[in-house]
Image (cartoon, rainbow, N blue to C red):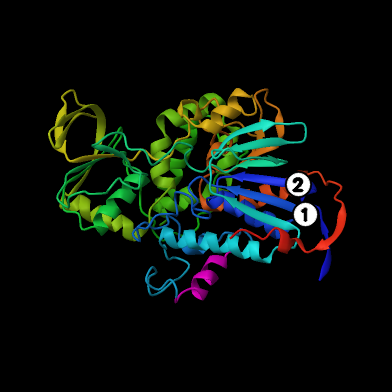
Amino acid sequence: MINNVVSISNIPTVAIIGGGFSGSLIATHLLRNATQPLKIKLIDRNGEFGKGIAYSTKENTDLLNVPAGKMSAFPDDADHLLRWLESNSTTLQSLLPSRISHRTFIPRQVYGLYIQSVLTEAQNSCTNHVYLEKLNHEAISIEKTNQGVLISLDNNQHFPADKVILAIGNSPSNPSQSHNNYSYNAWSSSALDNIDSNADILLVGTGLTMVDIVTSLHSRNHQGKIYALSRRGLSPQSHKKTTPYPLFLTVENAPLNILKLFKLIRHEVRKGHALGYNWRSIIDSLRPITQQLWQKLPKTEQKRFLRHLTPYWDIHRHRIAPNVGEIIHAKLKSGQLTINAGRIKSYQVQEDKTKVIIRPRYQKQNTVILVDRVIHCQGIANDYRSISHPLITNLQVQGLIRLNSLGLGIDTDGKGRILNGNGKISGLLYTIGTPCRGDLWETTAVPELRKQAQTLAENILADLEVQKIELVTTPSLRNVLPKIA
């Protein structure tokens, strides 16, 4: 059969660097909504397309921090995930609880399979003139050209693109590196390898990453002592059923002083408690306007918040699944897990143990613990000024990006368009998620990211210059350039 098709060489190309949740969703929306011929190159150095770091876990105890009813990939289709879970219930039977509802906290690895399925479905149902190519490599440089940009990969492959999206996720640093023979990064696949069930462990950091490690140890029936340490000793709170709280704050009437703002919120928590509301309801009521509140604050107040209040906000805003909270509570109650506030002064290797010198918070005397392994659980990296990352360095040297002065990613226009070194909006580069934290603050959770992905895809399709594409009579391009699974 002979079809009218377009010349491949003239088709605009959108390159997405990062194939995790955000990158895969942007690709999905481009595949679903492109009405003009388009090539999409989805680049991921780990090859975990649709999963990224967050959802590539194999631990079934690693649960989502948000119930399934709020985790649809599509902001305008709230039950999409629930329908997918129901239609795949037989295949996923060994990974899921017997009953699934809107309030079920499903395993993160199942959610990764869901995002992969969403991308595959979009790829299989797109029009003849829209193509997706998956590249299991790392992008190391982007050079501006007269027509767009030239992207170089770590295998010496180069290709041109008209638009580039940096969907580099929660950390541009390599999470697989161990510090040495006794100290590991929690994101490393080897962090818990060859560890004796009675080993004593120090977790440096007490946030969500610490929770993941503790639940992983629990699934391994670990019996040894677990020490968790951070400057303030704060750990994430659990989700509980809440009742929606009426709007008590607007962007217009919010104070521009961070201390006054938090005093107002604490006053509302006390007021809500007297009326029978849980503090979670008050915090959740701020979610629709959190980004606007952040953008309204003067830079000095944003810095004050980051210096003094971020840990307190994080443990109340980013909560854990109830059954995960029960595991943490049980281990604290039994004494197997202790969560402490303080600073590490030094490490000393002593044969098969590590001696850790700690200065507890508000104390003048050091304490000493002996452990078999140290695992660093400080979470995501935001400050690109202090991170060694080839692509970020390359873009900065060329003046194609400007690092955020707060140490939160890179500067954007607040809508995903990257600002260059002179502060002007780039017509070539876009980003999503963690790199936008300086401009949006709350920009790493699925409800925010899915909307950003949809809007960004729409904007890119609108921004993309419609090229004059010569129609040729040739066998269908599906036989010339098959989609790559």
Quarter occupied by the C terminus: bottom right
Dot 1: what SS? loop
Q: Earlier in the sequence, mark 1 or mark 2?
A: 2
Picture coordinates of residue 346, whole percent (x, y)? 22, 26
Give me the disc on residue 12.
Answer: 2
Q: Are marks 1 and 2 in contact (CB under 8 Å)?
A: yes
Q: Is residue 237 left or right of residue 348?
A: right
| Total count of labels | 2
Q: Is residue 247 visible?
A: no
Q: Is residue 465 left or right of residue 317?
A: right
Picture coordinates of residue 356, whole percent (x, y)? 19, 31
Q: Amino acid at mark 1?
A: Pro
As for residue 244 lying within the magenta part, the answer is no
View extreme (bottom): residue: 90
Please, is residue 113 above or below residue 340 in the view?
A: below
Q: Quadrant of residue 313?
A: top left
View extreme (left): residue: 351
Predominant secondary structure, magenta span: helix
Boundaries of the magenta span:
78-90
Give me the disc on residue 171.
Answer: none
Front residue of 51 and 309:
51
Give me the disc on residue 37.
Answer: 1
Q: Is residue 400 visible?
A: yes
Dot 2: what SS? loop
Q: Quadrant of residue 175?
A: top left
Q: Quadrant of residue 155?
A: top right
Picture coordinates of residue 434, whole percent (x, y)? 52, 40
Q: Residue at x 30, y 39 (%)?
A: 184
Picture coordinates of residue 396, whole percent (x, y)? 59, 26
